[in-house]
């Protein structure tokens, strides 16, 4: 590797077997090889493996969260018109907005997550956790990430927004599809949740 040049990773190198079960050896290997790595996957991305590097990058004003234009470029030209409105709507999400607008919106949202507000949600969260745990009482073993950690935040948010419990499965499916789309925009799985 030429000095000063970032190593280029393939998805197979980064997303190797065993990554989910124990990601730390992979993280350590790439951190030892250099602070930043370009991952050659679809539209390309940078992987930073140290806390200090991530903290520096996230505060660097030369970097932007506005990346919907990049997503649109990964879609075949003949389909871009279909996705243009979706990209515009995604561009309104806080995830894709830079400071100072992001900071203003975050401050407004923080009021809804004050210690007093969070404490007032305790009974609802305990009820949700109880509903999640109930079917687990009938099995000998379970994947706690899949069974509890994955659905719990969405179910709490749905409760806060007054969304009926009957829509939870649909919301989880939509969440998966959106996450998949943001990783791989030309997916046909939008039909799974009726989008």
Image (cartoon, rainbow, N blue to C red):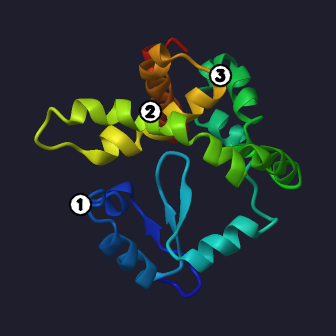
* Residue 56 location (% of width, % of height): 69, 75
* Residue 112 location (% of width, % of height): 74, 43
* Residue 48 location (% of width, % of height): 54, 70
Query: Which numbered dot is residue 83?
Result: 3
Let me know if residue 188 appears in the view.
no
Q: Secondary structure at mark 2?
A: helix
The residue located at (42%, 65%) in the rendering is 9
Q: Earlier in the sequence, mark 3 or mark 2?
A: 3
Q: Is residue 75 left or right of residue 149?
A: right
The residue located at (47%, 56%) in the rendering is 40
Residue 182, picture quadrant: top right
Q: Secondary structure at mark 3?
A: helix
Q: Nearer the viewer, mark 1 or mark 3?
A: 1
Q: Is residue 132 left or right of residue 100?
A: left
Q: Which residue is mark 2?
A: 128
Q: Nearer the viewer, mark 3 or mark 2?
A: 2
Nearer to me, 170 or 66:
170
Indicate whether 91 appears above or below 166: below
Binning the other alpha carbons within 10 Å of mark 3 as few (below 14), some (14 to 19) or many (20 upward) gives some
Q: Which residue is mark 1?
A: 18
Q: Is residue 78 left or right of residue 132?
A: right
């Amino acid at each position: 590797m030429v000095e000063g040049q970032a190593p280029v990773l393939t998805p197979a190198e980064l997303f190797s077997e065993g990554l989910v079960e124990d990601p730390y050896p992979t993280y350590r290997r790439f951190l030892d090889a250099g602070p930043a790595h370009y991952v050659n996957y679809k539209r390309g991305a940078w992987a930073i493996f140290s806390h200090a590097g991530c903290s520096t990058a996230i505060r660097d004003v030369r970097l932007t969260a506005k990346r919907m234009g990049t997503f649109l470029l990964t879609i075949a030209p003949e389909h871009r018109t279909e996705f243009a409105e979706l990209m515009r709507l995604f561009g309104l999400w806080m995830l894709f907005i830079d400071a100072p607008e992001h900071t203003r919106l975050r401050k407004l949202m923080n009021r809804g997550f004050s210690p007093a507000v969070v404490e007032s949600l305790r009974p609802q969260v305990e009820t949700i956790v109880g509903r999640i745990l109930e079917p687990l009482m009938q099995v000998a073993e379970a994947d706690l990430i899949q069974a509890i950690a994955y659905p719990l935040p969405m179910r709490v948010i749905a409760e806060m927004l007054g969304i009926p419990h009957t829509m939870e499965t649909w919301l989880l499916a939509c969440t998966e599809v959106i996450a998949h789309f943001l990783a791989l925009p030309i997916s046909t799985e939008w039909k799974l949740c009726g989008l």
